[in-house]
Image: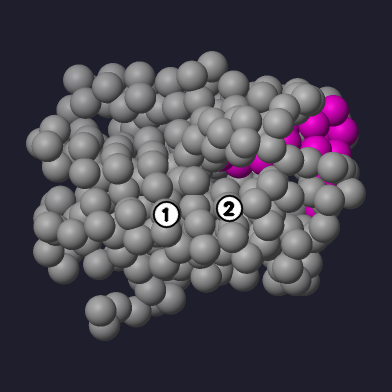
Amino acid sequence: MNFDLKAYLSHHRNLINTYLKKILDGCDSNRELIKAMSYSLMAGGKRVRPVLGIAAAQACGKDFLPALPACCAIEMIHTYSLIHDDLPAMDDDDQRRGLPTCHKKFSEATAILAGDALLTHAFEILSSPEPVFECFPDFPIRLELVSHIARAAGTHGMIEGQMLDMQSYSLHKKDMLAHLKHIHALKTGKMITVSVMAGAISVGTPKIVLEKLITYADNIGLAFQVADDILNIEGDPKIMGKAAGSDILNDKITFPAIIGLDESKTYSKILVANAIDAIAGFDENADPLRAVANYIVNRDR
């Protein structure tokens, strides 16, 4: 596959950043709350979720522009989750994306409210994209997107996964692995899967095609977390923009801790292979999805 992923990621990250800035420009930038929201949202990041939404729309042979409101909303929700994950009551991190975390830059209360504001404003953008976006789905599709994204972000997805991750369990090793997979299918996987779904749904993709994309996304969602666990051991903090080794220090349940580092690397590659197999019948329009799948296990941050 002769595909320039670096250029693809760069171009679409810039596009997403342009629209995220437009969203923030609609708010009063002099308010402390908006400053904190902007600080975290525009701090960089891989933008994997919105890029996946764009790539899913393209894989269906469609113009991705109607998918942009959902893609941006998902990135806002993702950023809110990072702000809250970093709080002292959660992971208690001092650095994110190479910068002081939101609660270190501002205050703990401001960080909590900035996260809340990003989450709620995301659904305003989803339901009423007209002030920012030139192209967007019809209202019934927007309502469907709100339902899917709310479910993925809430008690059936990311929030429940985070809750399970915070709780301690006395489990046998075999049970621990199944439990870990369940945590990350919720905490990381649901938002990655709904990113792909949102891109496809925004452009009117048939259900039979959507199901294949969901299988793809479910596999790369878990692969993404396995890769994160590996990077927490082997990654360079200067490249990642956050500390390495924190999982071991905090005695967290991770894939390397349960099945070992080498087996974790093998498992992530199997998941990526399964993802690519799921879209084997797609034409070259799906090359970005294939490339992103491989990028997930070969990234350095």
Q: Are marks 1 and 2 in contact (CB under 8 Å)?
A: yes
Q: Is residue 75 above or below residue 298?
A: above
Counting from the top left corner in percent of width and height, residue 201 is at 22, 35
Q: Is residue 81 magenta?
A: yes
Question: Which image quarter: residue 104?
Answer: top right
Circle 2 packing at 10 Å, graded few (<14), some (14-19), many (20+), is: many
Image disc number at residue 226: 2
Whichever of labels 1 and 2 marks the residue nearer the N terminus, that label is: 2
Residue at the spot of label 1: 271
Q: Which amino acid lies under the numbered mark 1 shown in the image of this protein?
A: Leu
Res. 106 image quadrant: top right
Q: Secondary structure at mark 2?
A: helix
Residue lying at 14% horizontally and 42% vertically, measured from the top left: 209
Amino acid under label 2?
A: Val
Image: magenta residue range: 78-95
Residue at 72%, 27% (x, y): give it. 171
Task: Give the image location of residue 245, x and y in percent.
Answer: 82, 57
Along the line of sight, the residue nearer the viewer: 80 or 280: 280
Which of 108/218 is in front?
218
Calculate the distance from the C-alpha at mark 1 to the C-alpha at mark 2: 10 Å
Measuring 14% from the left and 58% from the top, which residue is drawn there? 282
The N terminus, quarter of image: bottom left
User: For the point 76% across and 24% down, which residue is it?
Assistant: 169
Find residue 134 and report its horizontal and vertical position in percent. Answer: 26, 44
Q: Is residue 197 magenta?
A: no
